[in-house]
Amino acid sequence: MATYADAQELTALRSLSASIGRSPHLTQAAGGNTSLKSGDTLWIKASGTWLKDAVTDDIMVPVAMAPLLRAVEQRDSAAEQPQIFAIEALNARKLRPSIETTVHALMPQRVVLHVHCVDTISLAVQADCEAEVARRLEGLEWAYVPYRRPGLPLAQGIAERLRPGVDVLILANHGLVVAAETVAEAEILLRRVTLLLARPARQVVEADIAALTALAGSSGYKLPADIEAHAVAIDPESCRMAAAGSLYPDHVIFLGRGSVLAKPGEDVPGVTGRCGTAPMAILFPGLGVLMRGDASAGANAMQRCLADVTARVDVAAKLNYLTAAENDELINWDAEKYRQKLNAASN
């Protein structure tokens, strides 16, 4: 770090990052990232690492900011590979910077927090998101960014919407970015914005564990890690939303396209036989969810996220789903294949 003060800020950022990472309502699995600018160096969370580990593990990577910003400005494909700009002398573990390093570099503030807040996502998937957020964030300097694939396309989308003074970004079908000059100020802003965007979740009855266990049989499918994950299958409105497609990138990365629903009377073998494949998760309407036996911690976290997000969406709202092409570009993206590899290795 350039100064003792910067070192103190990085320590504070690690602590805040771990706190954010422990809240499934703020981020899930390896999603979300935080950063601190120190002179010409950007310290950012490494790809595939979990924010909750920020204090106990060395997950921050130093990146040379000036050449990275030049690459973004010139629409150079090198900006899609932030590891090119990592400062190797300070990166002993040879970690890759976050795939969203360009987003952090573009924000002029020293501290940037990007979270996959479920309240924000529940608004960000609605077609009326911009108008609804405008009502809730009146008086704040914020910008709405239409959906772009994470990485360089998202950075370019932000550059088109960024104006002086903006310190809050609402990313369509994705999440929230807040930025400030200090870690303490960023934490206060994050807390303020998430409170303004908060919405109550629809309540559901408990999952039918006995029925789910019987439906799994000897298939190898198992109950999800979090009991909260069942809600998406139990609540009819959430189930309807999930059945219609993919709502945000990390769902596609960890769970695949959309959601698979069992038909009345179907057990796990019936579903896998009909689909011709074994989906990562199966929703049994009115009963709950079963996960494939090899489901990662990341997949489990994202299955709960789906329940948390859909439970907060306005049942009358028109939703914007990722298109077939947008699903494909996420699944076939090298940066996400790398993150998946790390996720599998961490199980």
Image: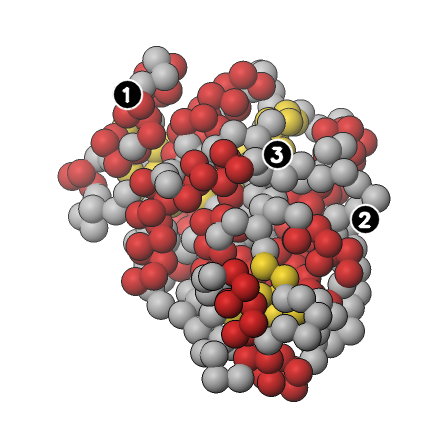
Towards the viewer: 187 or 25: 25
Q: Which badge, 1 or 3, comes first in the chain's sequence?
A: 1
Element at label 2: loop
Q: Which residue is mark 2?
A: 315
Towards the viewer: 322 or 185: 322
Name the residue rendered at 57%, 31% in the picture: 147
Residue type for callout 2: Val
Q: Residues within 10 Å of mark 3 (few under 14, many from 20)?
A: many
Element at label 1: helix
Is residue 94 left or right of 10 when viewed as pictured?
left
CA–CA distance between discs 2 and 1?
46 Å
Is residue 274 left or right of 191 when viewed as pictured?
left
Front position among marks 2 and 1: 2
The reply to whether residue 103 is visible in this rendering is yes
Q: Which residue is mark 1?
A: 67
Q: Which badge, 2 or 1, comes first in the chain's sequence?
A: 1
Residue type for callout 3: Ala
Q: Check residue 172 in the rendering and tell me which mark sits there, or answer none.
A: 3
Q: Residues within 10 Å of mark 2 (few under 14, many from 20)?
A: some
Please identify the quarter of the rendering in which residue 126 is found: top right
Q: Residue furthest top?
A: 74
CA–CA distance between discs 2 and 3?
18 Å
Name the residue rendered at 61%, 34% in the picture: 172
The answer to whether the residues at label 2 and label 3 have Cβ atoms under 8 Å apart is no
The colour scheme is secondary structure
Front position among marks 2 and 3: 2
Q: Is residue 304 above or below residue 66?
A: below
Residue type for callout 1: Pro
Element at label 3: loop
Name the residue rendered at 41%, 44% in the picture: 331
Name the residue rendered at 66%, 53% in the picture: 243
Q: Which badge, 2 or 3, comes first in the chain's sequence?
A: 3
